Image: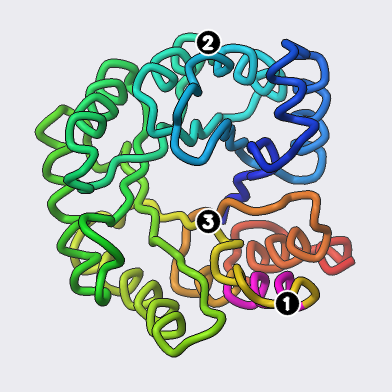
Amino acid sequence: MLAIANNLNFKNREFLSAVRTGNTDWIARQALALKAAGADMLAVSLSLDGDGDEKYMKTAVLGAREAGLTLSIDSRNPDAQEIAAEAAGSKIIINYLSADFRREKEMAEILGAAASANADLVIYPLRKGIPADADERLGIIEDLMEKANTAGIANDRLIIDLMVLHMAGNVRGQEQAVAVQETLYGLSELVEPPVRTTCWLSNISAGSARDLRPEINRTYLAMLAGLGLWSAYIDVLDKETMRTVRLVRAFKNESVYSQADAA
């Protein structure tokens, strides 16, 4: 299982300040620190909705690429994605393509950007509101995969975001947490060979008490890993989470276990 560092995002005030002031050196140092902490890839996120991302994307990517890791560009802004692909100097992950009818034009441009840049593409199973269950998720995923294939993006370039939602506060949240697990099961039957999967881990604990969130995140990560999760967007500076990642890899025979993995 791969760890995608989600630390370079718009909620990180130092990162946002560095991006806005053109401080690529700070971004590079942070990217290298994330790599040293165990990141396999780096996510770059400049805003929640992609608005204005094209203005600062080149600065963010030029700094982040110094770590020599694959960059996941988290933006619904097609112009920003094209800028990122050019600045990265290597293949990127474009995050994401959805079936949201309100963003049909924007999503078509995202699809075009991924195709022309030969980028990997994250598929997000959203159409109109939260999917009711795993079957609806799988239906949306199947439609989006077909659309990507038609655009020339093969399944081996696709990554399925399982759409993890927060569990706190109501039964519906718990049902959605289970639906994510059922979606992982369903994907193994829908696609052969299996397609890669990912999730934004911190979403599962959103709304929970701050001191409980890390434990909720780590427990859910271990469960999804056991079901075949390929990667997760996580805080790689959280040592306990990274210990979970190391142990998961050992238990899945993806690495040679050592005492240091449990330290």
Is residue 215 located in the magenta-colored stretch of the structure?
A: yes
> Which dot, 1 or 3, sits closer to the camera?
1
Quarter location, residue 244: bottom right
**Residue type, numbered disc 3:** Trp
* Residue nearest the observer in this picture, 59 or 229: 59
Q: Position of residue 23 (x, y in %)?
A: 78, 13
Left or right position of 16 against 133: right
Q: Residue at x 67, y 65 (%)?
A: 250
- Residue 209, which numbered label? 1
Give the farthest residue toward the bottom.
171
Task: Tell me the number on the disc at residue 200.
Answer: 3
**Helix, strand or loop at disc 1?**
loop
Q: Amino acid at mark 1?
A: Ala
Compared across the picture, whether 259 is left or right of 83 comes to right
Which disc number belongs to residue 53? none
Q: Quadrant of the C terminus?
A: bottom right
N-terminal of the two: label 1 or label 3? 3
The residue under label 2 is 87
Residue at position x 53%, y 56% in the image: 200
User: Does residue 246 lie above or below 118 as drawn?
Assistant: below
The residue at 27%/55% (across/down) is 126
Binning the other alpha carbons within 10 Å of mark 1 as few (below 14), some (14 to 19) or many (20 upward) gives few
Considering depth in this image, is 251 or 202 the residue closer to the camera?
A: 202
Identify the magenta region: 212-220
Q: Tell me residue 20's x, y (percent).
A: 69, 17
Task: Give, as a three-letter code, the residue at label 2.
Answer: Ala
Q: Is label 1 in contact with label 2 (beta carbons under 8 Å)?
A: no
